[in-house]
Every structure is written in C-alpha cells, then in structure tokens.
Amino acid sequence: MNRKTFLILIGLLLVLGGAGLALFWQDLGAWRSAGTKIGSKPFEKLATNEVAQVRLYDGKDETTLALKEGRWTVKQRGDYSASVQEIGDLLVKLPDLKVVQTENVGASLLPRLNLVAPNKDAKADGAGTQLELSDKSGTVLGSLLLGKIIVKKEPSPLPIQQETPVGRYVLSPGAPTVLVMSDALKNASAKPAAWLAKDFFKAERIKSLAASGDSAQWKIARKEEFDPWKFADGAGALDPSKAVAAVNALAALTFTDVAFEVKPETLDKPRTFVAETYDNLVYTIKVAPKAGSENFYVTVAVTGEPPRTRTPETNEKPADLERLDKQFAETLKKLDDRIKFEKGLAGWVYVVPAKTLDPLLKARPELVAAARPK
C-alpha cells in the first residue's frame, strides 16, 4: 500500500467516524430530552392512589380494570370482581420501574421486540401490549407499550432449560428509543380472565352429598363428622377413597374464567350436586359441559344459616367456658364472612377445568368398592 492510498483510507475513516459520532450525539440528545437515561424511572411520579382505571390492549384481547364504588372490576367480564392482589402488585411495581438499558432500534426491527402498536383493525405481527392508567375523570396518568419479555437462561440438570424473566422491552409515548426495564411485568396481560378474583366457594364439613342428572344418581352420607361414608340408601359397598375424593373436590374447586354472557338457567342438561353440611348450610352446584372444550360450566347457590349458639361439650369444665365461647364467636364470624361472599357467587356462571370436577362426575357404579378376591 503506497502513502497516497494510506492517507485516503485515513481520511475516509475520519469522515465515517465523524458521521457516526454526530449520529451518536443526536441519538443521545433525543434520549436525554425524553428523560430516558439509564436509572431513570418513567413512572416515578405516578400517583398510584389516583389510578381508577387500568387498560391493557394487544390488538386481540382487551382488559379494562375499573374502580367502582370502592371495588375493582373487570369490564369485559360483566364487572366481575378483579384481583386486588394482581392490580396492587402492578401499581406497586410501576413507580420503581427503572431503565437499565436503551436501544436505538429501527422501525423494521420493532416487530421482533413485540413493540408494534396494537390495532384492532390491523392485528399486525409483533404487536405489543398497550398499558394505560387513568384517574376517575378519565385523564390519562401514564402509558407504556410493553414488548417482549427478556429471559435469563438458568443452568438446570433437566433436559429443559429453565428461563427466568429479568426485564422487558418497552416504548414510551412519542419516544423513539427502546427501553429495557428492570422488571418483566409478566402479569400485565390483556386477557380479562387473568385479572379475575379467583376466590371460590369451599363446601366444608359435609354430612351428605347427592348427585342427580344423567347417570349420576347417587347419595352418600355419614352420621357423625368423622364416620365413614356410606350410600344413603344402604345398598352396595362404597369405595371410601372415591367418596372422600368427591367430597374434598367441593372444597378445592377452582375456575379459570367467568362466562358472564351465559345465564344459569340456560345450562344444557346440567348435573346437580347438593351438599348439606354440619353448619346447616346447603350448597347446590350445577355442572354442564362447555361445548368445544374440556371445561365445564358451573353455578353455585348457598342457603341456610349456621347455628348462632354453641352446644356445650360433654363434661365441659366451667374453667373452659370463656375460652370455648370465644373460639366459637371467632369461628362464627369467619363463617358468616365466608357465607356472605359465597352467596354473592350466585347468578354467575364459572368455567371450571374438567380435571378438578372428575371426582364428582362419576356414576354410581364407579363409586362402588371393588370386590375383594376370595
């Protein structure tokens, strides 16, 4: 290489370097003007106590969480109660959300980071989740476009590598710079079912359970609370483990969604389960298949009132009277609160996974104990 060629190359490098430096300072100026330097907190000044509505939208699903009369609700589920814990978790995290990295990404690369603005008329690939917070007057307090979650791969002895969410790509309104935030906000889903309060009824201390509808015609009962279960009509040997599983299912049911558009009276040929408890409560549960899925529609109605006075124990000592009365009053208060909540579940139709209902959905022959080999 001669001297002239060498000098030309040096000149080109200086020109390119200067252009790159100019672009760097231009991008840096935009970054600084947007207030998005590393360590900054976009929602630091968010008045979380003024937030009365949270909207999440990704072009396919939409959730509007609204504070109504002191209660958080899910608009897309007929104003069913929202999970206060999930909402609180989100609102607590936002003010502490830090920028840990900035990326200058061209528009053509935004789909890879799921940072395309969602649009219901054009559901583009790579759409993000728009998060918008408003006060009770509808004034927007803050918004953010949530993109792809960043995961860290953890070493694992298992064939499947474990991944831990460690951050998330986001875009602030009107800012061209992609930000990497310190929290993945993995629960910020636009699916309404993800925000429902999942508290459900728990039928406990059951003394009899009857099933009717289709082939499920049976009733099991026990006289005392810890007696073995038997068929109420006295015919046939009951499999104790299957009886216990059926009864326990009524204290452990969970639901995945609320079918607010379905009316309880329109369920197609439901099976009915009636559970009577030692607390003088009666649970009436109706179960019907959900077409096109392995799930079931479920309704529940609770009637009855628990005893208001305590029955003294056998050989009860006067010294124990105050303690036992106090325990009874505390238990009754908790029971009254639970009953009030459970009675509020009437009128709603819940979507319940088949696997949690399986112990209940057995015909009488399936509950009969297998004959012992002679």
Image: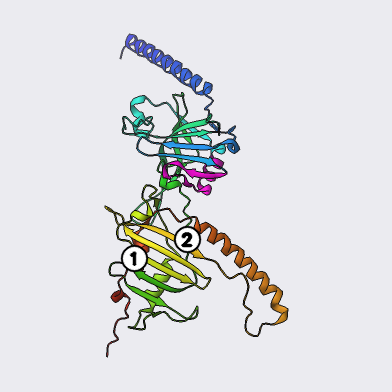
- In the image shown, does 127 or 357 lie closer to the viewer? 357
Coloring scheme used: rainbow
Is 307 one of the magenta-colored residues? no
As drawn, 106 above or below 55: above
Q: Position of residue 168 (x, y in %)?
A: 44, 38
Left or right: 282 in relation to 365: right
Number of the front mark, 1 or 2 = 2
Q: Amino acid at mark 2?
A: Phe
Dividing the picture into quarters, in which one does residue 165 lie?
top left
Q: Amino acid at mark 1?
A: Asp
User: Residue drawn 40% across and 43% down?
Assistant: 191
Q: Which residue is mark 2?
A: 201
Q: Position of residue 185 (x, y in %)?
A: 47, 41
Res 265 seen here: yes
Q: Position of residue 316 (x, y in %)?
A: 66, 82
- In the image shown, does 343 or 103 lie closer to the viewer? 343
The 10 Å Cα crowd at callout 2, few under 14, some 14 to 19, many 20 or more, is many
Quadrant placement of the C terminus: bottom left
Is 75 one of the magenta-colored residues? yes
As drawn, 193 above or below 110: below
Residues marked 1 and 2 touching at CB (< 8 Å): no
Quadrant placement of the N terminus: top left
Lower sequence index among marks 1 and 2: 2
Residue furthest right in the image: 319
SS at mark 2 in the image: loop
- In the image shown, does 198 or 149 lie closer to the viewer? 198
Q: Which residue is mark 1?
A: 358
Q: Read off the magenta span.
A: 70-93
User: Residue drawn 28% across and 76% down?
Assistant: 365
As drawn, 22 above or below 203: above
User: Residue drawn 34% across and 62% down?
Assistant: 355
